[in-house]
Image (tube, coloured by chain):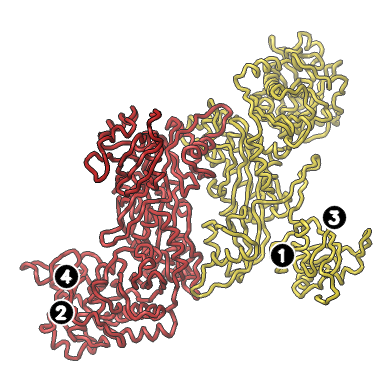
Chain colours: A yellow, B red
Amino acid sequence: MTADNTPKTHRLVLMPSGRRGDVPHGITVLKAAASLGVEIESICAGRETCGKCLISLERGTFPKHDLTSIDEHLSPPDEAEIAYAEKYGISLEERRMSCVTRILGDVLITVPEESQARKQVIRKEASDLTIEVMPAMRLYYVEVEPAVLGGPGDWQRLQAALEAEWGLRDLRIDPLVLRTLQAALRNGKWAVTVTVWQGKEVVRVVPGYNDDLYGLAADIGSTTVALHLCDLRTGAVLATESAMNPQVRYGEDLMSRVTYTMMEAGGTGRMHHAIIKTLNDLALRAAETAGIDPRAIMDSVLVGNTVMHHLLLNIDPVELGRVPFALSTQDAVDIKARDLGLTALHPAAMTHVLPCIAGFIGADSVSVLLAEQPNLDSQMTLIVDIGTNAEILLGNRDHVVCASSPTGPALEGAHIRHGQRAAPGAIERVRIDGKTGRVRYKVIGDDRWNDMLDEGEKLSATGICGSGIIEAVAELFLTGLIDRTGRFAPDAAGRSSAVRFNGALGEIVLAPGSETSTGTDIIVTQKDIRAIQLAKGALYAGARMLMEHLGVAHVDRIKLAGAFGSYINPWHAMVIGMIPDCDLANVSAVGNSAGDGARIALLNIEQREIAARAAHAVEYVETGGTTTFQDRFVDAMTLPHASDSFPHLDGALPPSE
Amino acid sequence: MTADNTPKTHRLVLMPSGRRGDVPHGITVLKAAASLGVEIESICAGRETCGKCLISLERGTFPKHDLTSIDEHLSPPDEAEIAYAEKYGISLEERRMSCVTRILGDVLITVPEESQARKQVIRKEASDLTIEVMPAMRLYYVEVEPAVLGGPGDWQRLQAALEAEWGLRDLRIDPLVLRTLQAALRNGKWAVTVTVWQGKEVVRVVPGYNDDLYGLAADIGSTTVALHLCDLRTGAVLATESAMNPQVRYGEDLMSRVTYTMMEAGGTGRMHHAIIKTLNDLALRAAETAGIDPRAIMDSVLVGNTVMHHLLLNIDPVELGRVPFALSTQDAVDIKARDLGLTALHPAAMTHVLPCIAGFIGADSVSVLLAEQPNLDSQMTLIVDIGTNAEILLGNRDHVVCASSPTGPALEGAHIRHGQRAAPGAIERVRIDGKTGRVRYKVIGDDRWNDMLDEGEKLSATGICGSGIIEAVAELFLTGLIDRTGRFAPDAAGRSSAVRFNGALGEIVLAPGSETSTGTDIIVTQKDIRAIQLAKGALYAGARMLMEHLGVAHVDRIKLAGAFGSYINPWHAMVIGMIPDCDLANVSAVGNSAGDGARIALLNIEQREIAARAAHAVEYVETGGTTTFQDRFVDAMTLPHASDSFPHLDGALPPSE
């Protein structure tokens, strides 16, 4: 290898990146790749234990590259590598360990996706956003000097090993982990896998080689809690679980929960413990689904609106319920999971709570920002996350503004006569024939319209969810059964047999009792229509106010976030004037963006920094009590809207059935 | 003040430091003093609230200084200062607030002890060691901007205020303190007193001005736990409490406790919780004695031997019980008191556990080192801290070595027929008349010898403590009732009526049953003498081994630490050859040095650094199993010693009665 005629350097080409360069003779592929900027994963630091650094050898033809001599251009496998390959059924013809394979001549090598240190996780099919896996927790396999009489302590020798092998300095150790250190070192025969948080703190030491490393991302909504269990090494989602927010029993909407803390001593703690218990339950359930040990969950990211944020941290949300709606803190919070009571996780697991923006714009909005990235885009994007309050983000790479609009719970189906949450049995689609006045509908959980059923079948509707009521109002308006002010037309009952009057107040039967689960007619009342007008007016007014604030007349793109956004029909939403005019092709549902953002922050610490900066950069625009908003609000309650035009609706067809 | 003929600078002289220099016209005394290197205490940053920065005005004659014009050379008091002076009965003729008083001419000012930022605490009368009060916890009074709609969160504004007024940057806040922040700010009308740990973390926020700041220093001995409650602002000890170590019920000596953890599942946790409960109880008791709120205890320093150290931290001490006696960690540990279960303290209080040196040399020895500072002295000092093991430190400023000697529990009165702990009623002094063989004694709690009592009185002795048995053995040897091997002389019973034989084994009655509390004779048996020989032999052998290791033939000074050291008579200890030869004038009892060291580390963070460095610098010398030690040990069991001479005993008189 050191013969005089051996050149000092060789040409290395790395696929799929295409990076190439000259590297010294005898260097390992792992180090050579790093010198060309390609990081290959390795947990065991060349001890031929972890098998994370495998590379592929290309043996076929490859344009411009001679691959015939690859066996002579790489050092042969040693005994340990051969043993590993036999144990795991790996062909050393095709794959080699980059940590021990040395470069002896020009080579072209492929670094497969699973061996790249920064794996790319595609967030979802609909988006081109990719996230590199760079979690806050990292694994390091080390062999520690055995203890000797009068020598340094176990933690001191572990520190020395981590510094010598991985360059980790000034590490601290969670005092609870110190309790497990001695047994781990001895059970692992002085070899352990160490989990380090943010390059600063040792949070786990397990005997021998062990690459179990998991994290949780949870979106704590006022009504629903959704949790993803992710593999922190690969970024894969292993399980997704959801549950009702147990705080609902203390108050359906946010303000009633804030009121509860004011009225009931210990109310904050009670709601805190309730949500923490739910998170523990969900974590255990997710671990069971995924077949992993919940104690291997080392990290977690939590997001929620400001009241959820405060209750999560056991901070009394009382100040969020009164002027000037001051946040206890708006920056991200790093906290030991145990200090929150998240006992299902590893005892030294961490929790990161994303930052908030203002009194009504919480970590869930920052999470949406992280997932949708309007701040990186040239297009003017409007994002609405609809709940009891609608959080609205508007902007592009120049500037993003945000506001909260008091839509009330009507869009979630609450305070509506037959309203219900989006769940199987809820009427989610409504069509009214302009000529016959006949009503058709669909329920969640069945693909058929009610007039496509066989004899004797029924859909057994249980109620109406948010999207169903939006469509009902839109269809009533399009057919002229209600007027621009939302009032039933005097001749409405004559034009549709489904419409009836109860004194002066009209109502329409969507599903007669014979087709429902309860035997009662499912109806939309005049009062329900008013509630929807208030909600859509608030949302629209908020969006318009932000547009005026930024001085833009139209938006390029609208993203509807949250469960409601997934069910809603953009065309109907625009018909009733709930969202501003926009090319319908650019109106999309983006699903649980807050949950996506939480997952992004879980998998990538740089994204936590980005979230922190974004939270500070986003400008909050106050709606409550401002004259502009009130004027806009009153104006926006008509159908579709008193003063704005909706050119994109002209000639647009109602959505196909 | 700004007239043209006013000089730009004035001469300031500060007493008692004598520092002097030119300072700008109009500067406050506080800032001017700081510029000359004299730090004056101030918590409220010139808000005329805390009154901590008062200075004295010298009005009498003072050599070389004209003090007549002082009133013209200082700015007059403002309304707030006058109000404060009236409220607290302060004469503004004599004392002024240095934070607002401006220098308008040459002045001489005295900074009284109580206004110096770094107060000097004299540790104890016998020592010249002084410690500056520089605790890990510091108080900062700040006024925070009120919350505004859409403005930054409460914690963000508090950070801004702490940075603007105190230059504190990059502060984090304990997440549990975040829960109290909003109420504190509003109850204090936006003025709060903040406690900051190590300049890094906010651990308390209380409304308005509040300078309650306390700390605990505890020495956890195998048998006894001693705790001091200190004022962290002044350094004063407010209360001292002690209790039995509740772990005694799981094993009297250290090794039986280690064995307990091996034999009983959950044994470590049980002993951990027991000692933590005792510390909580002592903290509450101390707070009650001092009349303070235990929740104002913000810091704590704990020391103990290595097994106590591990059990405190809930670390299984099993490795300390077997070769190679590996410590889990030897460095100091900073831990949230709540993570230890110290719930009597403030929820965000910190605990600092001093470092250990080696498997048998724990944080208590580091604490002794801090209190006695042999490493700063030119004299060769031997320090022995006697318990079940004796920890021995030997050295001077060049080098310090340490060892642990297995003295066993005899010197603490255990495993001695009538042995007991040093407590009222225990025989602590013994004299035997060489001619008559008559025995005299004293008990703890009474100043009189048993032959000084009035008719019908008795001392009601309960047993013999360590110092009593040492004196008994020494007196037996001096009177020839026992020989150099420790065996009773065949004619001993003939020479003293107190001596009797039980078969071949002699024993001596110190107190006949008529004078004891139990009615039983209190005796010293041949077996007791053997136990003392073993103990003193181990101690002496350890000390000699360290002397040989350092190549020194004699020591300049001997310090006896711990409760035992306080009762023991150095002359008698030297007679039996328990300690090496030394000028008796230089043999002293230093009391609970470990507790003193804990208090020093509590009051001064620089001393924690010094302890950390010293722990690394001290060289551990292994005794167990080495041939040198075993030889020395056998040799040292004779009275006083087989091969060494004790020139300082020649001609020295027995201690006066």
Q: Position of residue A206 (x, y in %)?
A: 61, 63
Amino acid type shown at disc 2: Ile
Is there CB contact under 8 Å for labels 3 and 4? Answer: no
Question: Which quadrant of the structure image shows residue A385?
Answer: top right
Query: Which of the two residues, B187 or A260, is positioned nearer the viewer here?
Result: B187
Instruction: Using the rendered image, report if marks 4 and 2 lie on a common chain.
Output: yes
Is residue A141 among the parts visible in the rendering? yes
In space, the residues marked 4 and 1 are separated at their CA atoms by 72 Å
In space, the residues marked 2 and 3 are separated at their CA atoms by 97 Å
In space, the residues marked 3 and 1 are separated at their CA atoms by 26 Å
In space, the residues marked 3 and 4 are separated at their CA atoms by 92 Å
Question: Which quadrant of the structure image shows residue B545?
Answer: bottom left
Query: Which of the two residues, B302 or A596, is positioned nearer the viewer here?
Result: B302
Query: Which of the two residues, A423 or B530, is positioned nearer the viewer here?
Result: B530
Residue B432 is labelled as 2
Q: Label 4 is found on which chain of the structure? A: B
Instruction: Using the rendered image, report if marks 2 and 3 lie on a common chain.
Output: no
- Tag nearer the camera, 3 or 4: 3
Instruction: Using the rendered image, report if marks 3 and 4 lie on a common chain.
Output: no
Q: Which mark is first along the chain, 2 or 4?
A: 2
Label 4, on which residue? B442
Amino acid type shown at disc 3: Gly
- Tag nearer the camera, 3 or 1: 3
Residue A18 is labelled as 3
